[in-house]
């Protein structure tokens, strides 16, 4: 696919500053995410977004020059919430120097973190409208591909640092590849699970945990 339509960020005509404007702006994004997810990009209109958001079409155009920029803002929210969730999951682990499980814990840190990450991100994919909006409109991926790929690279960097602690004997190039495999496999399975029935999706996520644990376990055991 070509990369000519990439955009680093949504082009907002007027950044909200006052509390009332910020609330109106956030409500527009909330409504747009739901409508893009439910009806798709083509069927969603600026007039429809304004009506459901209970704001005038003029107010909507004060913030965004067109529907494409509204969608980019929704995609930005999805990326921001992904980054926030990832930071909350892994920031403490980066600071924690222990590798073995704490007293009373049945499993090592790396195994618990795999389970936590799958749970948190599966919940976001299933419940967060901005995630559902971008998944329902994959034809627009190039609009936010640069930001998405930058985020995934940052995830890989963090995971690579953790692997260095969990498996210090693993050569750096191999650590990098293992980190990519963990991040990209998780991302792809999470996306694929959203296209299945709830029952199959649940089983896919259970298998994802098993697969990631079995993949990483030999590297960690070699370090012990």
Image: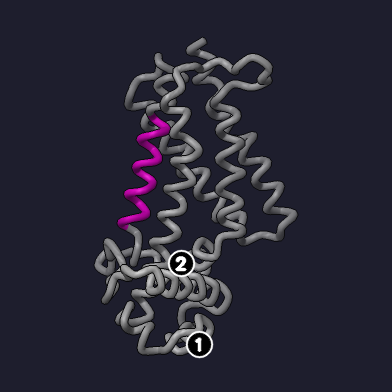
Report, in whole angstroms, how far the alpha carbon at label 1 lies from the one at label 2. 25 Å
Locate residue 161 relative to residue 133 in the image: left or right. left
Q: Is residue 164 above or below residue 150?
A: above
Q: Which residues are magenta?
A: 146-160
Work out whether residue 133 or residue 90 is closer to the camera in this orientation and state it: 90
Q: Residue furthest top?
A: 224
Residue located at (48% from left, 73% from top):
27
Q: Is residue 167 above or below residue 34?
A: above
Does the residue at mark 1 contact the one at mark 2 (Cβ under 8 Å)?
no
Estimate how packed mark 2 is, as few (under 14), some (14 to 19) or many (20 or more) residues with alpha carbons within 10 Å: few
Task: Identify the residue position indicated by label 1 in the image.
Answer: 51
Could you say whether the residue bearing mark 1 is in a helix, strand or loop?
helix
Q: Is residue 151 magenta?
A: yes
Split into 4 quadrants, where in the image is the N terminus? bottom left
Work out whether residue 28 or residue 189 is closer to the camera in this orientation and state it: 28
Estimate how packed mark 1 is, as few (under 14), some (14 to 19) or many (20 or more) residues with alpha carbons within 10 Å: some
**Label for residue 25?**
none
């Amino acid at each position: 696919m070509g990369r000519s339509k990439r955009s680093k960020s949504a082009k907002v005509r007027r950044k909200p500053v006052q509390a009332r404007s910020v609330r109106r702006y956030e409500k527009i994004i909330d409504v747009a995410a739901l409508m893009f997810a439910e009806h798709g990009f083509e069927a969603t209109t600026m007039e429809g977004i304004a009506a459901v958001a209970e704001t005038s079409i003029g107010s909507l155009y004060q913030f965004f020059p067109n529907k494409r920029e509204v969608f980019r803002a929704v995609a930005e929210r999805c990326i921001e919430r992904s980054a926030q969730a990832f930071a909350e999951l892994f920031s403490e682990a980066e600071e924690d120097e222990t590798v073995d499980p704490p007293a009373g814990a049945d499993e090592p840190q790396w195994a618990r973190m795999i389970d936590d990450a799958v749970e948190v991100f599966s919940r976001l994919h299933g419940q967060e409208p901005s995630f559902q909006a971008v998944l329902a409109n994959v034809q627009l991926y190039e609009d936010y591909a640069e930001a998405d790929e930058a985020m995934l690279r940052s995830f890989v960097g963090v995971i690579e640092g953790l692997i260095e602690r969990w498996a210090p004997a693993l050569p750096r190039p191999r650590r990098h590849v293992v980190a990519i495999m963990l991040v990209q496999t998780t991302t792809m399975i999470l996306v694929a699970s959203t296209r299945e029935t709830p029952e199959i999706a649940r089983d896919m996520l259970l298998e994802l945990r098993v697969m990631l644990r079995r993949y990483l376990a030999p590297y960690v055991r070699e370090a012990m």
